[in-house]
Image: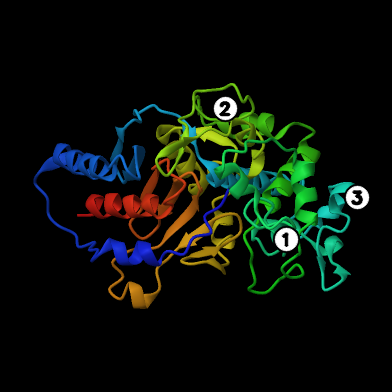
Amino acid sequence: MRRGVIFLLFIFGMGALGYAQKNSSSGQLEKEKALQRILDKTVDNKKVFGCSFALKKNDFSWIGSSGNMSLNQSYFIASTTKLFTTALIMQLRFEGKLKLEDFIVNYLPDSITHHLNVFLNKDYSKTITIQHLLTHSSGLPDYFQDKGKQGFSLEQELLLGRDQAWTPAQAIERTKNMRSFFRPSSGSMAHYSDANFQLLGLIIEKITGKPYAEVCLERILQPLTLKNTYVYRDEKDTLPKVIYYKSNELRIPKAMTSFGADGGIVSTSEDMMVFIQAFFQGKLFPASYISEMQKWRKIFFPMRSGIGFHKFELPWLLNPMGAVPVFIGHSGLSGALAYYCPEEDIFVVGTVNQIANPDLSFKTMIKLTRELSK
C-alpha cells in the first residue's frame, strides 16, 4: 500500500514550525511528558483512535502510545514493508547474487514478465531492471490504487468492505490489464506501483529458493531479534490492531495476507525502531549503499523516490526557514511510518492507524521531532 497523497492540507494545517534549539533544565522526564502530551492530543476519537510512536536522538530514546493502542501493540506497517524488501535486495546485491542493473526477465518466468509493460503498442517488458522496480521507474501501473478496466481500484473495493485475497501472480495479472504509464525510464520519471515490490518479492524467492516470509525471518527478524515482527499470512490472526477507515474498523484479513513484499508486515514501534536504525546504520547491508540510493525522482508531493526508500522534503516556498528538516524512509497507507532525519540525527517510527487521513502520521512525526529538538 502506498501514500499517493496531496499534502497541501498537511502544510496549511501545521502552522509555524520551529526547530530552534533551547537549553533545557527540565530533564528527561519533562521531555517524555511533553512527547506523551502530543500523542494524547493526536487521539481525538474522531480521526485517530489510537497511536504508537518511538523516537531516538543520540542517547535519548522514548516510546509512547495513546488511545486504544498499548506500548507493545502490534500493527500493520503497510508499505513501510518496502524497507524490508529493499534491505533484502541490498543484501543479495552485497552477496553478488544480483545486480541492480539486471533485467528481471533473468529471474522471473515468461508467465510473469510477458507483456508486463506495453507502452504505445510496444512491449518494453524485457528492459525492466531491478533498479526500475526499486525506484518506481518501471512505468508499471499500481494493481492496488490505480483503476482497472472496471473503473474502480482494488483499494476502493477493500474500503467498501469487499475483502479478498490474491497471489503475487494475480496481482501482476491485474497490473497487465492496466495501461502502462511510460517505458522503463533511466530519467526522472516515476509512478508509484505496488506491483514493483510484488515483483521484487518474487525475485527474492527465486534467488533464495524460500518464501518471502521465511527469508525475512532468517535475514532480518532473527538477526535483529525482532520478536514481534512478522509477515502476516494467517487471516485468523487477530494480534495486529485493526486498521481504521474514518470512524470504522476496516477488517480485511484476506487482503492483508496478500500484500506480502509490498505491504504485508506486522510490527511494533519498539521493533521498528531497532529495524530503522539497522537499515540506515549498515547493520543489514553496507552503509555505503545509503548514499548511492539517494538518487531522487518526483513521485508525489512532497515525496521523492530514491532506490528503495523516499525523501520527505518540503519545498522552499512552504518551508522558507528550513523549519522542517529532511526525512528519509518510508510510510504506509495504514498511517504507519519509519523515517530518519540525518540533519538532526533523529529516528522516528510509529502509526496513527488511520487510512482516511494519511497526513496525520506526518503531522505527528513533525510535532514529536520538533519537541525532541527543543
Q: Which amino acid type is shown beneath numbered disc 2?
A: Gln
Q: Which amino acid type is shown beneath numbered disc 3?
A: Asp
Residue at mark 3 to residue at mark 1: CA–CA distance: 17 Å
Q: Name the spot of residue 27 as percent of width and height, x first.
A: 13, 41
Q: Name the spot of residue 345 as percent of width and height, x first.
A: 35, 53
Q: How crowded is mark 3: few (under 14 residues within 10 Å), some or many (20 or more)?
A: few
Residue at mark 2 to residue at mark 1: CA–CA distance: 33 Å
Q: Mark 2 points at which residue?
A: 222
Q: In this view, does 118 lie above or below 366?
A: below
Q: Could you say whether the residue bearing mark 3 is in a helix, strand or loop?
A: helix
In the image, 102 versus 125, the foreground residue is 125
Q: Earlier in the sequence, mark 3 or mark 2?
A: 3
Q: Could you say whether the residue bearing mark 1 is in a helix, strand or loop?
A: loop
Q: Residue 110 carries which label?
A: 3
Q: How crowded is mark 1: few (under 14 residues within 10 Å), some or many (20 or more)?
A: many
Which-is-in-front pick, marks 3 and 2?
3
Q: Residue at x 53, y 32 (%)?
A: 251
Q: Name the spot of residue 348 as percent of width and height, x first.
A: 38, 46
In the image, 357 versus 116, the foreground residue is 357
Tell me, yes or no, if residue 325 can be seen here: no
Q: Mark 1 points at which residue?
A: 140
Q: Residue at x 46, y 57 (%)?
A: 328
